Amino acid sequence: MTKPRLYSGMQPSADSLQIGNYIGALMQWRDLQQAYDAYFSVVDLHALTQPNDPAELRQKTRRTAAQYIAAGIEPSRSTLYVQSHVRAHAELAWILSTITGFGEAGRMTQFKDKSQRYGSDATSVGLFTYPVLMAADILLYQTDIVPVGDDQKQHVELTRDLAERFNSRYGDTFRVPMPVIQQDTARIYDLQNPTAKMSKSAESDAGVLWLLDDPSVSAKKVMRAVTDSEGSVRYDREAKPGVSNLLVIYAALTGRQIPAIEDEYAGRGYGDFKKGLAEVVVGEFGPVRERALELLADPAELDRVLATNAARADEVADATLAAVYDKVGLLRRV
Ligand code: ATP
Ligand code: LTN
């Protein structure tokens, strides 16, 4: 029996991933790759919508791929590749852009937010068509499910609309994918500002737990995390955002339930709790970091793995793209 397909990706927007990426995405990906025929990309073409130094972008792309593998994505089981290595993405994005409404793309909230922030002169057409490229990523692989954070749900809805529109206009071509939205509990907040989502591109580094931080740095960041003056380890997202966030991280990394952790630390101070969490974080990240650094020490081998995987992706993507070219009436090159 063939497994259903899964597609997801992350932008290479930093040298290291942060713990939110790990808990909110990579841990799920790692589990889901058993039951699904999974495709995971490092979406470097998407990253071009932000200003980038070329040498740094190349570096971040390799580092992101290495962290996928270090976190447990198996490149022999799942297809883990760099988006720009598979030409079909940019080509299908063009075709899909011809069936995307200008108003429809303009309604994407991520575009509205970012373009407002940058101003119209600094907003590129690429930022506007970002969701169309994302639709191409997904549709090329006849994807069944797309695990993403809730901020990406609207883009997956657009992907579904485009697939249905294309299918009804040109005949059945694309599978219509389902978004799988990660639970709210998997939302990790900044340790210094526990009402703001932890993010790779946060302004300050103090509240971000980087996967590739030295273990002593991660431990220090946990010990310095913002809490409150109550002193009891108790989950209450409204009244105690800092402690609640630490509890969510603790539970996610250990697979334990929050009430059990609350019980363990009942009557003990935040110092003990943070020490316990620091151990958990260091225990989890230490081996991931080591493995990532090992992989990065041999970039030629890493590039070879990525090339093998890109070749596998090419096969599926090219078949879809050829069908699309035929359907829309492009003349075949003989
Ligand atoms: P950037 O700051 O560059 O936008 P980011 O760190 O916010 O990056 P994305 O690259 O947008 O992360 O997201 C990659 C994946 O990680 C997505 O599936 C997203 O839902 C998940 N993710 C990112 N941040 C968090 C977080 N704080 N908590 C839970 N999941 C997260
Ligand atoms: N836009 C997504 C990254 C992304 C993606 C995709 C996710 C690009 N293409 C296809 C799932 C499927 C983000 O910023 N997290």
Image (tube, rainbow, N blue to C red):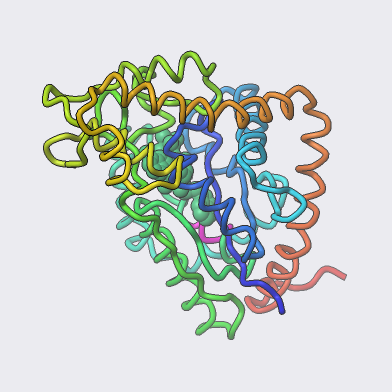
Count of number-bearing discs: 0
How far across and down, in percent of the image, does residue 225 sit?
Answer: 29, 21
How far across and down, in percent of the image, does residue 248 sit?
Answer: 33, 41
Q: Residue 194: say if magenta.
A: no
Q: Is residue 270 left or right of residue 323?
A: left
Q: Out of 253 and 66, give the one closest to the viewer.
A: 253
Q: Is residue 119 visible?
A: no
Quarter of the image containing the C terminus?
bottom right
Q: Is residue 141 left or right of residue 229?
A: right
Q: Residue at x 65, y 38 (%)?
A: 65
Where 47 sits versus 218, above or below? below
Q: Residue furthest right?
A: 334
Q: Residue at x 52, y 20 (%)?
A: 213
What's the magenta region? 132-137
Quarter of the image containing the N terminus?
bottom right
How far across and down, in percent of the image, does residue 308 sit?
Answer: 82, 48
Q: Residue at x 22, y 33 (%)?
A: 266
Corner quadrant of residue 94: bottom right
Split into quadrants, the picture shows ligand 1 in the one at: top left
Q: Out of 148 and 1, give the one closest to the viewer.
A: 1
Q: Is residue 202 left or right of residue 265?
A: right
Q: Residue at x 35, y 63 (%)?
A: 104
Q: Residue 135: say if magenta.
A: yes
Q: Out of 297 and 107, give the one closest to the viewer.
A: 297
How far across and down, in percent of the image, does residue 265 sit?
Answer: 28, 32
Q: Out of 89 and 277, give the one closest to the viewer.
A: 277
Q: Is residue 200 left or right of residue 196?
A: right
